[in-house]
Image: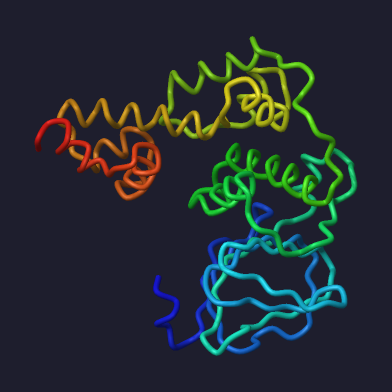
Amino acid sequence: MDFDKLSRDRVRTLDDGQAGIRRMEAFFHGTPYSLHRHDSYAIGITLFGLQCFFYRGRRYRARPGQVHILFPDELHDGGAGTQDGFAYRIAYIDPCLLQQALGGRALPFVRNPVLTADSAWASLLDKLWEPDLCEDEFLRTEFVADAVDCLETAAGSRSAGRPGSIAFERLCKVREAIIQDPARRLDAAALERLADMDRWSIARSFRAAFGTSPSRFRTMRQLERARERLEAGMPLAEAALDAGFADQSHMTRRFREAFGMSPRQWKRATFGA
Protein backbone atom coordinates (compact mmCIF):
# COMPACT_ATOMS: atom_id res chain seq x y z
CA MET A 1 0.00 0.00 0.00
CA ASP A 2 1.29 3.50 -0.87
CA PHE A 3 0.84 5.13 2.52
CA ASP A 4 2.20 8.45 1.26
CA LYS A 5 -0.84 8.68 -1.05
CA LEU A 6 -3.45 8.10 1.61
CA SER A 7 -5.55 11.12 2.50
CA ARG A 8 -7.64 9.67 5.31
CA ASP A 9 -6.95 7.69 8.47
CA ARG A 10 -7.50 3.95 8.32
CA VAL A 11 -7.59 1.05 10.77
CA ARG A 12 -7.79 -2.64 9.88
CA THR A 13 -8.27 -5.17 12.69
CA LEU A 14 -7.46 -8.79 11.91
CA ASP A 15 -8.57 -10.72 14.99
CA ASP A 16 -11.13 -10.76 17.79
CA GLY A 17 -8.56 -11.48 20.51
CA GLN A 18 -10.08 -14.81 21.51
CA ALA A 19 -6.79 -16.62 20.83
CA GLY A 20 -4.87 -14.21 23.05
CA ILE A 21 -3.58 -12.11 20.13
CA ARG A 22 -5.25 -9.14 18.46
CA ARG A 23 -3.50 -7.69 15.40
CA MET A 24 -4.11 -4.33 13.81
CA GLU A 25 -2.77 -2.27 10.92
CA ALA A 26 -3.31 1.50 10.94
CA PHE A 27 -2.50 4.75 9.19
CA PHE A 28 -3.01 8.08 10.95
CA HIS A 29 -2.29 11.77 10.64
CA GLY A 30 -1.78 14.02 13.62
CA THR A 31 -1.98 12.65 17.16
CA PRO A 32 -4.87 10.18 17.25
CA TYR A 33 -4.03 8.66 20.64
CA SER A 34 -4.15 10.53 23.93
CA LEU A 35 -2.54 8.99 27.01
CA HIS A 36 -4.00 5.55 27.67
CA ARG A 37 -3.00 2.11 28.87
CA HIS A 38 -4.01 -1.48 28.16
CA ASP A 39 -3.50 -4.75 30.00
CA SER A 40 -1.71 -6.52 27.16
CA TYR A 41 1.78 -6.55 25.74
CA ALA A 42 2.06 -4.52 22.54
CA ILE A 43 4.60 -5.37 19.84
CA GLY A 44 4.50 -3.24 16.71
CA ILE A 45 6.54 -2.14 13.72
CA THR A 46 6.48 1.22 11.96
CA LEU A 47 5.78 0.89 8.24
CA PHE A 48 5.75 4.50 7.06
CA GLY A 49 6.56 7.95 8.39
CA LEU A 50 7.76 8.84 11.86
CA GLN A 51 5.82 7.37 14.78
CA CYS A 52 6.15 9.30 18.05
CA PHE A 53 4.92 8.36 21.50
CA PHE A 54 5.31 9.27 25.15
CA TYR A 55 6.22 6.32 27.39
CA ARG A 56 7.53 6.14 30.95
CA GLY A 57 8.43 9.83 31.13
CA ARG A 58 10.19 10.12 27.76
CA ARG A 59 9.37 10.85 24.15
CA TYR A 60 10.33 8.16 21.63
CA ARG A 61 10.45 8.02 17.85
CA ALA A 62 10.15 4.91 15.69
CA ARG A 63 11.16 4.99 12.04
CA PRO A 64 10.12 2.52 9.31
CA GLY A 65 11.43 -0.96 10.12
CA GLN A 66 11.88 -0.24 13.82
CA VAL A 67 10.06 -2.30 16.44
CA HIS A 68 8.27 -0.79 19.41
CA ILE A 69 7.46 -2.75 22.55
CA LEU A 70 5.08 -1.55 25.27
CA PHE A 71 4.75 -3.25 28.62
CA PRO A 72 1.23 -3.91 30.01
CA ASP A 73 -0.47 -1.15 31.98
CA GLU A 74 2.06 1.56 31.04
CA LEU A 75 0.70 4.96 30.02
CA HIS A 76 1.49 5.99 26.44
CA ASP A 77 0.11 8.05 23.59
CA GLY A 78 0.82 8.04 19.86
CA GLY A 79 1.05 10.36 16.91
CA ALA A 80 2.79 11.32 13.70
CA GLY A 81 6.14 13.07 13.73
CA THR A 82 5.50 14.76 10.36
CA GLN A 83 2.50 16.05 8.44
CA ASP A 84 2.67 13.02 6.12
CA GLY A 85 1.26 10.75 8.83
CA PHE A 86 2.48 7.36 9.99
CA ALA A 87 1.55 3.71 9.44
CA TYR A 88 2.23 0.73 11.62
CA ARG A 89 1.29 -2.82 12.45
CA ILE A 90 0.81 -3.88 16.05
CA ALA A 91 -0.20 -6.95 18.02
CA TYR A 92 -1.72 -6.89 21.49
CA ILE A 93 -0.74 -10.09 23.27
CA ASP A 94 -2.36 -11.46 26.41
CA PRO A 95 0.36 -11.83 29.10
CA CYS A 96 -1.27 -15.13 30.09
CA LEU A 97 -0.38 -16.49 26.64
CA LEU A 98 3.25 -15.52 27.14
CA GLN A 99 3.25 -17.09 30.60
CA GLN A 100 2.56 -20.48 29.04
CA ALA A 101 6.07 -20.29 27.57
CA LEU A 102 7.63 -18.36 30.47
CA GLY A 103 6.62 -21.05 32.93
CA GLY A 104 6.17 -18.65 35.84
CA ARG A 105 9.16 -16.39 35.12
CA ALA A 106 8.46 -12.66 35.36
CA LEU A 107 7.24 -10.93 32.22
CA PRO A 108 10.32 -9.50 30.48
CA PHE A 109 10.46 -5.73 30.73
CA VAL A 110 12.22 -4.11 27.76
CA ARG A 111 13.64 -0.82 29.02
CA ASN A 112 14.22 0.71 25.59
CA PRO A 113 10.84 0.47 23.79
CA VAL A 114 12.24 1.14 20.28
CA LEU A 115 14.53 -1.44 18.67
CA THR A 116 16.01 -1.97 15.24
CA ALA A 117 14.85 -5.39 14.06
CA ASP A 118 17.60 -8.01 13.83
CA SER A 119 17.12 -11.42 12.17
CA ALA A 120 15.36 -12.87 15.23
CA TRP A 121 12.87 -10.00 15.37
CA ALA A 122 12.36 -10.13 11.60
CA SER A 123 11.51 -13.83 11.83
CA LEU A 124 9.16 -13.16 14.74
CA LEU A 125 7.34 -10.42 12.83
CA ASP A 126 6.98 -12.71 9.81
CA LYS A 127 5.21 -15.25 12.03
CA LEU A 128 3.13 -12.53 13.64
CA TRP A 129 1.56 -11.57 10.30
CA GLU A 130 0.84 -15.08 9.09
CA PRO A 131 -2.84 -14.94 8.08
CA ASP A 132 -3.78 -18.06 10.06
CA LEU A 133 -1.70 -17.35 13.18
CA CYS A 134 -4.72 -17.22 15.49
CA GLU A 135 -6.32 -20.35 13.99
CA ASP A 136 -3.18 -22.50 13.74
CA GLU A 137 -2.46 -23.66 17.28
CA PHE A 138 1.07 -24.84 16.70
CA LEU A 139 2.11 -21.80 14.68
CA ARG A 140 0.81 -19.73 17.59
CA THR A 141 2.87 -21.86 19.99
CA GLU A 142 6.01 -21.22 17.95
CA PHE A 143 5.28 -17.52 17.80
CA VAL A 144 4.83 -17.27 21.57
CA ALA A 145 8.03 -19.24 22.24
CA ASP A 146 9.97 -17.01 19.83
CA ALA A 147 8.35 -13.87 21.27
CA VAL A 148 9.47 -14.82 24.78
CA ASP A 149 13.01 -15.47 23.53
CA CYS A 150 13.13 -12.09 21.74
CA LEU A 151 11.64 -10.20 24.67
CA GLU A 152 13.89 -11.83 27.24
CA THR A 153 16.95 -11.14 25.08
CA ALA A 154 15.92 -7.50 24.63
CA ALA A 155 15.27 -7.23 28.36
CA GLY A 156 18.63 -8.82 29.21
CA SER A 157 16.95 -11.56 31.20
CA ARG A 158 17.65 -14.53 28.95
CA SER A 159 20.63 -16.76 29.57
CA ALA A 160 22.70 -17.39 26.47
CA GLY A 161 23.22 -20.80 24.96
CA ARG A 162 21.27 -23.62 23.37
CA PRO A 163 19.13 -26.24 25.07
CA GLY A 164 21.32 -28.66 26.98
CA SER A 165 19.99 -31.92 25.58
CA ILE A 166 17.72 -32.77 22.69
CA ALA A 167 15.27 -35.68 22.70
CA PHE A 168 16.25 -36.49 19.13
CA GLU A 169 14.28 -39.72 18.64
CA ARG A 170 11.08 -38.13 19.91
CA LEU A 171 11.59 -35.09 17.70
CA CYS A 172 12.10 -37.42 14.74
CA LYS A 173 8.58 -38.72 15.34
CA VAL A 174 7.25 -35.19 15.00
CA ARG A 175 9.28 -34.66 11.84
CA GLU A 176 8.05 -37.90 10.28
CA ALA A 177 4.43 -37.10 11.13
CA ILE A 178 4.76 -33.80 9.28
CA ILE A 179 6.35 -35.48 6.27
CA GLN A 180 3.58 -38.06 6.07
CA ASP A 181 0.81 -35.47 5.82
CA PRO A 182 2.09 -31.91 5.29
CA ALA A 183 -1.32 -30.71 4.09
CA ARG A 184 -2.75 -31.29 7.55
CA ARG A 185 -2.55 -28.39 9.98
CA LEU A 186 -0.29 -29.15 12.94
CA ASP A 187 -2.24 -30.38 15.96
CA ALA A 188 -0.34 -29.32 19.08
CA ALA A 189 -2.02 -31.85 21.38
CA ALA A 190 -1.37 -34.72 18.95
CA LEU A 191 2.30 -33.76 18.63
CA GLU A 192 2.60 -33.54 22.41
CA ARG A 193 1.30 -37.10 22.71
CA LEU A 194 3.51 -38.31 19.88
CA ALA A 195 6.72 -36.82 21.27
CA ASP A 196 5.81 -37.07 24.97
CA MET A 197 6.91 -33.44 25.27
CA ASP A 198 5.05 -30.21 25.89
CA ARG A 199 4.46 -27.96 22.88
CA TRP A 200 6.92 -25.31 24.06
CA SER A 201 9.73 -27.85 24.26
CA ILE A 202 8.81 -29.17 20.82
CA ALA A 203 8.86 -25.69 19.28
CA ARG A 204 12.29 -24.84 20.72
CA SER A 205 13.96 -28.25 20.49
CA PHE A 206 12.81 -28.93 16.91
CA ARG A 207 14.68 -25.84 15.74
CA ALA A 208 17.75 -26.82 17.75
CA ALA A 209 17.69 -30.32 16.24
CA PHE A 210 16.76 -29.56 12.62
CA GLY A 211 17.60 -25.90 12.11
CA THR A 212 14.05 -24.75 11.46
CA SER A 213 10.67 -24.60 13.17
CA PRO A 214 7.98 -27.29 12.79
CA SER A 215 5.69 -24.91 10.91
CA ARG A 216 8.45 -23.83 8.53
CA PHE A 217 9.39 -27.49 7.97
CA ARG A 218 5.74 -28.22 7.20
CA THR A 219 5.53 -25.29 4.75
CA MET A 220 8.51 -26.61 2.79
CA ARG A 221 6.94 -30.07 2.59
CA GLN A 222 3.71 -28.44 1.40
CA LEU A 223 5.65 -26.65 -1.32
CA GLU A 224 7.30 -29.90 -2.36
CA ARG A 225 3.87 -31.48 -2.74
CA ALA A 226 2.62 -28.48 -4.70
CA ARG A 227 5.56 -28.70 -7.11
CA GLU A 228 4.92 -32.39 -7.62
CA ARG A 229 1.28 -31.65 -8.46
CA LEU A 230 2.26 -28.85 -10.83
CA GLU A 231 4.75 -31.15 -12.55
CA ALA A 232 1.89 -33.60 -13.05
CA GLY A 233 -0.15 -30.88 -14.77
CA MET A 234 -2.51 -29.95 -11.95
CA PRO A 235 -3.83 -26.35 -12.15
CA LEU A 236 -2.36 -23.87 -9.69
CA ALA A 237 -5.52 -23.41 -7.62
CA GLU A 238 -6.05 -27.17 -7.26
CA ALA A 239 -2.39 -27.76 -6.38
CA ALA A 240 -2.61 -25.10 -3.67
CA LEU A 241 -5.62 -26.71 -2.00
CA ASP A 242 -4.20 -30.22 -2.38
CA ALA A 243 -1.03 -29.11 -0.59
CA GLY A 244 -3.02 -27.60 2.27
CA PHE A 245 -2.69 -23.89 1.47
CA ALA A 246 -5.66 -21.61 2.06
CA ASP A 247 -5.78 -20.61 -1.59
CA GLN A 248 -3.62 -19.98 -4.66
CA SER A 249 -2.37 -16.59 -3.46
CA HIS A 250 -1.27 -18.14 -0.16
CA MET A 251 0.73 -20.79 -2.01
CA THR A 252 2.19 -18.20 -4.40
CA ARG A 253 3.40 -16.05 -1.52
CA ARG A 254 5.07 -18.98 0.23
CA PHE A 255 6.48 -20.29 -3.08
CA ARG A 256 8.10 -16.96 -3.85
CA GLU A 257 9.52 -16.69 -0.33
CA ALA A 258 11.07 -20.16 -0.62
CA PHE A 259 12.23 -20.22 -4.23
CA GLY A 260 12.49 -16.60 -5.32
CA MET A 261 9.89 -16.88 -8.08
CA SER A 262 6.18 -17.47 -8.44
CA PRO A 263 4.75 -20.90 -9.34
CA ARG A 264 3.89 -19.58 -12.82
CA GLN A 265 7.45 -18.38 -13.34
CA TRP A 266 8.76 -21.72 -12.13
CA LYS A 267 6.45 -23.62 -14.51
CA ARG A 268 7.52 -21.47 -17.45
CA ALA A 269 11.20 -21.90 -16.59
CA THR A 270 10.84 -25.66 -16.04
CA PHE A 271 8.39 -26.69 -18.75
CA GLY A 272 8.29 -23.68 -21.03
CA ALA A 273 4.57 -23.36 -20.30
List x then y, in percent, for residue 80.
62, 83
Rendering quarter of residue 161 = top right
Vertical order, 86 against 88 (above or below): below
Colour pattern: rainbow
Front residue of this view, candidates 197 and 67: 67
Vertical placement of residue 37 versus 195, above or below: below
The x, y position of residue 259, in whole percent, is 34, 37
Q: Nearer the viewer, residue 149 or 228?
A: 149
Question: Residue at image x 74%, y 86%?
Answer: 34
> Residue 113 location in percent, x, y?
76, 64
Q: Judge left or right: residue 10 versus residue 98.
A: left
Q: Nearer the viewer, residue 198 or 260?
A: 260
| Residue 204 horizontal/vertical position (percent) | 69, 30
The residue located at (57%, 65%) in the rendering is 89
Residue at figure coordinates x 74%, y 56% from the top left: 94
Numbered disc total: 0
Q: Quadrant of the C terminus?
A: top left
Q: Residue furthest top?
A: 169
Left or right of residue 88: residue 241: left
Of the 4 image quadrants, the one containing the N terminus is bottom left
Q: Is residue 174 left or right of residue 259?
A: right
Residue at horizontal 76 percent and vertical 47 percent from the top: 98
